[in-house]
Image (cartoon, rainbow, N blue to C red):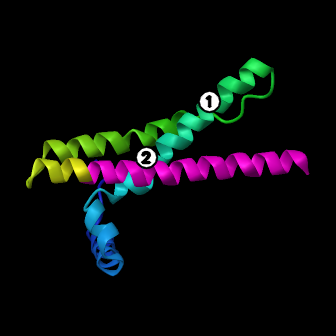
Amino acid sequence: LLVQPAWLGRAADRLAAALGSPGAVLGGRWPEALIGYPALWLGLWSQYRRLDAADSGRSAGADPRPWILLGLFGPAGTAQAVALARGPLLEAVARGGAALAMGSALGLAAALAGAGLRAARRGA
């Protein structure tokens, strides 16, 4: 679902060749791993913080809906890749799972880093 320009695809192929196995594991699922799932986690984390702030009477912060909308490209792209698999189905599912795992790790790291920066800013 995320359209990739030809030059970006060639650059990703070169990067995958340089990295070896991580590029081979993700295959063409890098947009979901680097954009979709991290954005989904950031949006869900922001929504959690908004709900927590509403319960405690603090300011709610930014609207998480743009992050969540961008994040929905992750699961949709993975579902599309599995549905249109030209190779073995298990390989497409495994690459989708690898994209989910990598994207989730990136998204959770970004959300926790943002929470740490907010806490440091409040404490200073």
Q: Quadrant of residue 54?
A: top right
Q: Quadrant of residue 3?
A: bottom left
- CA neighbours of label 2 inside 10 A, class few (<14), some (14 to 19), many (20+): many
Q: Main secondary structure of the magenta part?
A: helix
At label 2, which amino acid type do we have? Tyr
Question: What count of labels does the image hold?
Answer: 2
The residue closer to the viewer here, 6 or 23, is 23
In this picture, residue 80 sits left or right of residue 45: left
Name the residue: 80% across, 46% down: 119
Q: Residue furthest right?
A: 124
Percent coordinates x, y for residue 4 in the rendering = 30, 61
In three-dimensional space, the C-alpha distance between marks 1 and 2, rounded to whole angstroms, equals 16 Å
Which comes before the other along the chain, label 1 or label 2?
2
Name the residue: 28% across, 49% down: 96
Q: Which residues are magenta?
A: 95-124
The residue closer to the viewer here, 29 or 69, is 29
In this picture, residue 78 sits left or right of residue 48: left
Where does label 1 land, which residue? 48
In this picture, residue 50 sits left or right of residue 105: right
Name the residue: 75% across, 52% down: 117
Percent coordinates x, y for residue 121 in the rendering = 84, 50
- CA neighbours of label 1 inside 10 A, class few (<14), some (14 to 19), many (20+): few
The residue closer to the viewer here, 62 or 33, is 33
Label 2 SS: helix
Percent coordinates x, y for residue 8 in the rendering = 33, 70
Name the residue: 67% across, 32% down: 49
At label 1, which amino acid type do we have? Tyr
> For residue 37, which numbered disc appears in the image?
2
Label 1 SS: helix
In this picture, residue 8 sits left or right of residue 114: left
Percent coordinates x, y for residue 115 in the rendering = 70, 45
